Amino acid sequence: MSAFSDLPLVIEPADLADRLDAPELILVDLTSAQRYAEGHLPGARFVDPRQTQKGQSPAPGLLPDKAQLEALFGALGHRPEAVYVVYDDEGGGWAGRFIWLLDVIGHPHYHYLNGGLHAWLAEQRPLSQARPESVGGPVALELHDEPTATRDYIESRLGAADLAIWDARTPAEYRGEKALAARAGHMPGAINFEWTAAMDPQRALRIREDIAERLQALGISADKEIITHCQTHHRSGFTYLLAKALGYPRVKGYAGSWGEWGNLPDTPIQQ
Ligand SMILES: O=S(=O)([O-])[S-]
């Protein structure tokens, strides 16, 4: 049995500190190369957030090629019994996107460190500059479609009573006042709740304690299928993670996000 078996998806620094030596742990740092070099959680392996995206215009947030993912997870020492704990230094965008990737590869054992590096440092916990060795070559992976919404899937579901499209961008992007694509605005019926509004700056960017009620009041609720997006499915990595952490049963990330939707000529858009 794993040392992490009894823990919820979102864990606290003390939970992790007690388990840093667990053999099944793969601790993943999704900050930046510079931040990682300055000091990271002991034993953490750095993943450049760019490795989690395809990186090609106009929709850089699409899933990387399978071979890239097999190399990435091989280097991390991926194995069926591994338990991933992921963190970043921005309140959960890249960490959440990595959790979406774990769902895509069908790996169920993972946790998000609430507040990430900020929460760890706020508790004066130690950092390390030691870099764990890369573990090995590519591992064979099977990719799953269910965690991901495509443009066609979203168009087939628009207007459904049991659908909530969670737009994690800023209100200005949502309203079309700020354009990061050829066409600006939002998907018909989408609900705007910007990702940072779910973080508590007074508690080292941990998830706000009243988040369940706030989302429920907006109609982003557990009885709906949730499809979340931003510009490149980076900010919505966090909202994807959050919906899962709240126990919502049907959650998808739109990897194409606004980079795809807003650059297509014929997708329906509201302002
Ligand atoms: O993907 S993004 O909206 O954070 S640029």
Image: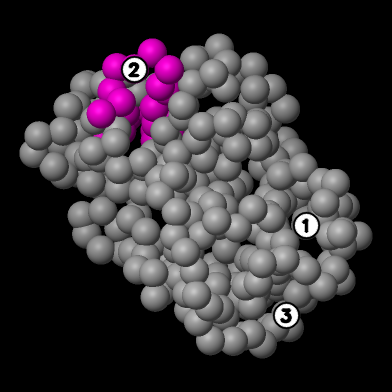
Q: Of the residues under marks 1 and 2, which one precedes in the sequence?
A: 1
Question: Mark 2 — residue?
Answer: 160
Question: Mark 3 — residue?
Answer: 129
Could you tell me how far apart the alpha carbons at marks 1 and 2 are, in whole angstroms? Answer: 44 Å
- The reply to whether residue 33 is visible in this rendering is no
- Quarter of the view holding residue 47: bottom right
Place of residue 10 in the rendered image (x, y in percent of width and height, measured from the top left): 72, 44
Residue farthest to the right?
18
Q: Looking at the picture, does residue 196 appear above or below residue 164? A: below
Could you tell me how far apart the alpha carbons at marks 1 and 3 are, in whole angstroms? Answer: 15 Å
The structure residue drawn at horizontal position 16% and vertical position 33%, both measured from the top left corner, is 267
Could you tell me how far apart the alpha carbons at marks 3 and 2 are, in whole angstroms? Answer: 50 Å
For residue 226: magenta?
Answer: no
The structure residue drawn at horizontal position 69% and vertical position 22%, both measured from the top left corner, is 210
Question: Mark 1 — residue?
Answer: 121
Query: Mark 2, residues whose alpha carbon is within 10 Å: few (<14), some, or many (≥20)?
Result: few
For marks 3 and 2, give the one nearer the viewer. Answer: 2
User: Which stretch is magenta?
Assistant: 156-180
Q: Would you say 117 lies left or right of 62 here? A: right
Secondary element under disc 3, as helix, strand or loop, is loop
